[in-house]
Amino acid sequence: MAAERAGDAAPLRVLVVDDERLARVRLEDLLRHEPEVEIVGTARNGALAVEAIRSLRPDLVFLDVQMPIMTGFDVVREIGPDAMPVTIFVTAYDQYALQAFDVAAVDYLVKPFTDERFEQAFRRARRLLALEGLDQLRAQLLAVLQLPGTARSSSREAESRTPPAQNREFLQRIPVEMRGKVRAVPVDEIDYITASGSYAELYVGDRRYTIRERMQVLEERLDPARFMRVHRSAIVRLERVEVLHRSAGGDYQLQLRGGVRLPVSRSRHEALERWLGLAR
């Protein structure tokens, strides 16, 4: 498909899928400002999206992840990665953004997104189509489908797909959106993470990045050999731990290189002591 486009001036055929009317209208408006783009259709749910993809054969799909009955991931499953057009995921939930970003999926948009962020995602998709990167993108879509939390299958099927802990794919970088731009923060640079309401704060040296993500999701997606959740509100990179303190009242704190102190819950201090080689 990309090769055919390189040889003529055929417009990029785009399908917009979202269960929210205003979200569809916003994407259509942004796309109308792009040259050589044809909006071939819209769909308000996953079932209609499957029909539209099969009948309209778009080049690019903006696909909402969280839709009732049939999610965006269900749509990809139904069509199949080999037949799926280039896809930009659209989501209001950052855990899906983390999954898509971690496997280098085409791109994602987290609602509400800026015009600049849309432009970045759209340009990336167009560039990949022009470079005929479809085989790679289909493999990446398949990887997305195999990530925890994206399937609504039976427990037996889920167990058969869940890799052993030593073979699991853990986060290597975390996307952070700031003023319409996305920076990938390598987990190797993170000293610790703290909870702040419905957000998490990543501390990298003297810098702090805020993402909308639950601590449980981050705990599950970070390598447990390198990161430990020491408190309901704190995750640390283990190699940064320097000292474990215990107060007269029996409370625990750990001290990181650089002097930062974080609370340690009583249920986690034994695991931390074992890692530090202090367990009797």
Image: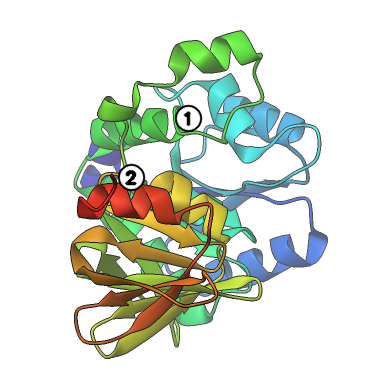
List x then y, in percent, for residue 15.
59, 47
Residue 266 visible in rendering: yes
Q: How is this picture coloured? A: rainbow
Q: Say which residue label 2 marks.
A: 224
Q: Quadrant of the C terminus?
A: top left
Residue under the point 41% across and 70% down: 193
Amino acid type at image mark 1: Leu
Q: Is residue 277 above or below residue 26?
A: above
The answer to which quarter of the image holds residue 269 is bottom left
Residue nearest the observer in this picture, 103 or 206: 206
- Crowding at label 1, few (<14), some or many (≥20) Cα neighbours within 10 Å? some
Q: Is residue 210 above or below residue 153?
A: below
- Crowding at label 2, few (<14), some or many (≥20) Cα neighbours within 10 Å? some
Q: Say which residue label 1 marks.
A: 145
Residue nearest the observer in this picture, 80 or 25: 80
Q: Secondary structure at mark 2?
A: loop
Q: Is residue 19 left or right of residue 189?
A: right
List x then y, in percent, for residue 207.
30, 88
Q: Secondary structure at mark 1?
A: helix
Q: Is residue 231 left or right of residue 23?
A: left
Q: Quadrant of the N terminus?
A: top left
Task: State the separation of the CA atoms marked 1 and 2.
Answer: 23 Å
